Amino acid sequence: MQILGSNYDFAANVAPIVTPTTVLTHNDLETFIELDTIATDPEGDPIYFRLADSSNGNVSFTPDGKFVRFTPEDGYFGDASFNLIADDGYSTAAPVEIKVDVSNAPLINLDIVNRSPRLDAGESTELVVVGDFSDQEDVILPASYVRFGSESGLVADVNEYGVLSGLSDRVEIVTVRKNGISAVTAVRMGDIPAPSNDSEFYVALAEQDGLQLYPEAVTLTTNMTRQLLVGLDESFSPELSTAEATDTFTYTVKDNDNNTSNTATVNITIKNSAPSIDKIDIEPNLAEGIAATFSADATDEGEIIYTWNFGDNTPELNGQSVTHTFADNGTYTATLTVTDSQGASTVETITLNVNNIAPTVTAGENQTTIENQGVQFNGNYSDP
């Protein structure tokens, strides 16, 4: 084998490499680990996995074989682990321990990511639920961890996998619950019906154009109350490249009895922001006496003026890209100032190391002479 290897460049197969990993989950909450993110094969061979020696939980592969699912034992929190063994069909790697930190931090908030879905009867969509724990936010929660429900069960149905199915044309309220915490969303099945009176018209208008709700989700305990601010979705896009200014909006609300509220006024003041410097490009190996190019990119809504000061007592240069020659070697502190049309500016300082260039020498023209006769040499040198 050694002779074959040396004569034909054969190399022994290298086993897959598995990176030891620690993941965080919470008691009774299964977690998923993507295998492609923790295992590689040096030769690019397909990798086959086995599981062994799990502690304080149950471990298995998902049906597609792309993830490992770890579920803590009921009510358990603390340290857990399992071993992952990787095999490429030629070599088997040593077992690698995957650690699981099972936290008992409480769940403090629930939310539905894909809120207010619209479905036709017979259509379905999967609801995505996230939760905030006291030690981790925005955790995607599997359907097995929460409980789903619909208000009537006649318009929409949510199964144990979080799949929402439309049954008939109407609006339904869907709820997700866990440990006394709830999140709700409205689901429209079918088209919005044509309104037959003013009240239905305003409801249809709000549903069609969308309602802006703050906060979008709340967590309440029994007998607790919370004020919600509701309004139609509107956007205001000021001309940000103009000077600072103030704009005013007024609002009134009319109820079903045609009673109009007082007028509410909102003043919006537009403030100018200084431009931001995104990057500065400098030629490598700066040297005395040799011209170098400097350029920069900055961001602003309006026009930008670039001003360069190279710290060597030479005049400032203007432009996004400039050329400058340092007369002598040394360390220089240069500054770039970017200024917008309203006078707001941002300054960035750069330290530049300019290298020394060796002198150049010329000895003059070649000469022919005779013995015992003096010769004059016309040598010369230059140094940047």
Image (cartoon, rainbow, N blue to C red):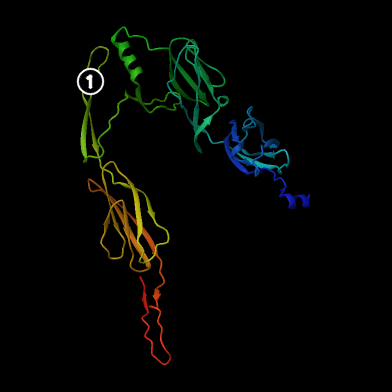
Q: Position of residue 368 (x, y in %)?
A: 41, 83
Q: Position of residue 280 (x, y in %)?
A: 37, 52
Query: Tag 1's secondary structure?
Result: loop
Q: Position of residue 276 (x, y in %)?
A: 33, 47
Residue shown at 55% from the left, 18% from the top: 159
Residue shown at 25% from the left, 62% from the top: 315
The kind of residue tagged 1 is: Ser
Decide: few, some or many residues near mark 1? Use Cα within 10 Å; few <14, some 14-19, many ≥20: few
Q: Quadrant of residue 142?
A: top right
Q: Residue furthest bottom?
A: 372
Residue shown at 59% from the left, 33% from the top: 32
Q: Is residue 134 visible?
A: no
> What residue did someone put label 1 on?
261
Q: Nearer the viewer, residue 83 or 28?
A: 83
Left or right of 330, for residue 174: right
Q: Position of residue 26 (x, y in %)?
A: 57, 34
